[in-house]
Structure formats: C-alpha cells, structure tokens
Image (cartoon, rainbow, N blue to C red):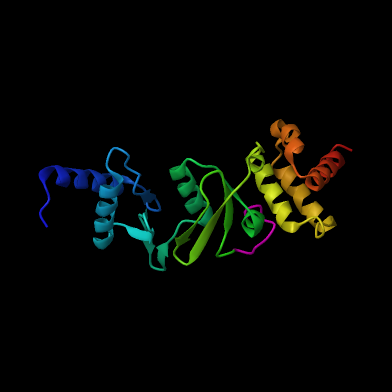
Amino acid sequence: MLISDNEKKVVDILRGRIDEADTGTLFFNNSFPEYNDEYVGKVLSDFVRQGLLLRLSRGIYLKAKKTKFGIVYPTTEEFARAIAERDNAEILPTGSTALNMLGLSEQVTMSPVFLTSGSARKVKCGNRTITFKRGVPKNFALKGQVTRLLVQAMKAIGERNYNNEWESAISVILSRYPEDKTMTDDLKVMPTWIRRSIIKILNSKHE
C-alpha cells in the first residue's frame, strides 16, 4: 500500500522518537498528541510487525529491552503509573501490592489492584491483569507518599490480624521514611483504627 510523502514524514518522525526513547518506555496511541490517535495506532501496529515495538495490550506498546534471558517487562507499578499518567489520574496500590512495595510481604500477585481517580478498568499486560478500581476522594487525600502506601497495606492486613509483629514492622518503615511534614494532616483522614495504631507507634518513638 502506497503512502503519501506527508504520511511517510510522520512515520519517520514517530520512528525517530521511538529510536531515541529508552528501552522499557511505554507508548500509547495518544503518546504523540500532535497527531491523530487512530492514525498513530496504525503506525505503532506497523512498528510491532517490524519488531520495533512489542504490543502489551490493546493500544499499549513497549520498546522492549531484550536480554539473553528474554524480554524485560516493566514492573506492575511502572505499567500502572504509565497508564495513570496517560489518563491524567492518580493511583494507589492496594492489597498485596502495597504490602510488597513496603517490604512487608514477598508475595507478588499476578492480578494487582490499584485504586484510581480515573476510570475503572482492567488492563492485561502479558500474563498479568491489572485492575483499576474507582477510589473515593478520601483515599487520595493523604499527602505523604509512604503514608498512602502504608494505609492501603494496613487495610490489607486488617484490624483483626494486626498484632505486635506488624506493629514492629511498620515502626521500622516509619523510622526509615519519616513524613513529619504531612503526618499531622494525614492522621486526620485515616481510618480510625489505623490512625490509633500509627499514633501509638509515633508516641513510642518520642518516649
């Protein structure tokens, strides 16, 4: 199929930008806003056929890093954050993903769930399925980045399962990543039992 000189110019521009991008970079149909999304999608699909990109899911492409052990895929968090940036949305890891990111669990789920301020959806990335659930504004009211993760991790633990062992592990995290500037405000919007538990840990540090 013949293409016009103008279309060839656009294809060359997109190819050049992808060539300049770091391996591991994710591309979407709207990654080049100066061009029509549908047309960009067709060009990126052509690049998949040419081996320049790898299609991870519908409308999601990866400039893959290839090693002797195979293709290096982005982490779940990198993938989720790229989608959030595309959608201009905030996200929060939940459950075992939050626990794992804080070092409170070694479990890595193949079906991670993120709260989002954007649209609810499920996105398949290789053998993983990432679920984005619509979160209430209060979930995103926390200002501390570690505190945000910590609250989601403690929700996953649950008040009934929370014990001295968990308290000690969380105390270490709060010592390693103090968020003094945001903690006062964050405590006001935490669930009651989590606020009470965090205050207990903070008070013990000042005794």
Q: Where's residue 154, x and y in %?
A: 73, 52
Q: Where's residue 82, x and y in %?
A: 46, 48
Q: Where's residue 196, x and y in %?
A: 83, 44
Residue 199 is inside the magenta segment: no
Horizontal side, residue 185 vs residue 49: left or right: right
Horizontal side, residue 173 vs residue 67: left or right: right
Residue at 61%, 57% (x, y): give it: 97
Horizontal side, residue 67 vs residue 79: left or right: left
Horizontal side, residue 138 vs residue 82: left or right: right
Residue at 89%, 38% (x, y): give it: 207
Q: Quadrant of residue 131?
A: bottom right
Residue at 80%, 55% (x, y): give it: 159
Region in magenta = 101-108
Residue 107 is inside the magenta segment: yes
Q: Quadrant of residue 143?
A: top right
Q: How many marks can you see?
A: 0
Task: Characterize the magenta stretch by its predominant secondary structure.
Answer: loop
Query: Which quadrant does the N terminus fall into?
Result: bottom left
The residue closer to the viewer here, 161 or 121, is: 121
Residue at 66%, 47% (x, y): give it: 149
Question: Which residue lies most toward the top here?
Answer: 181
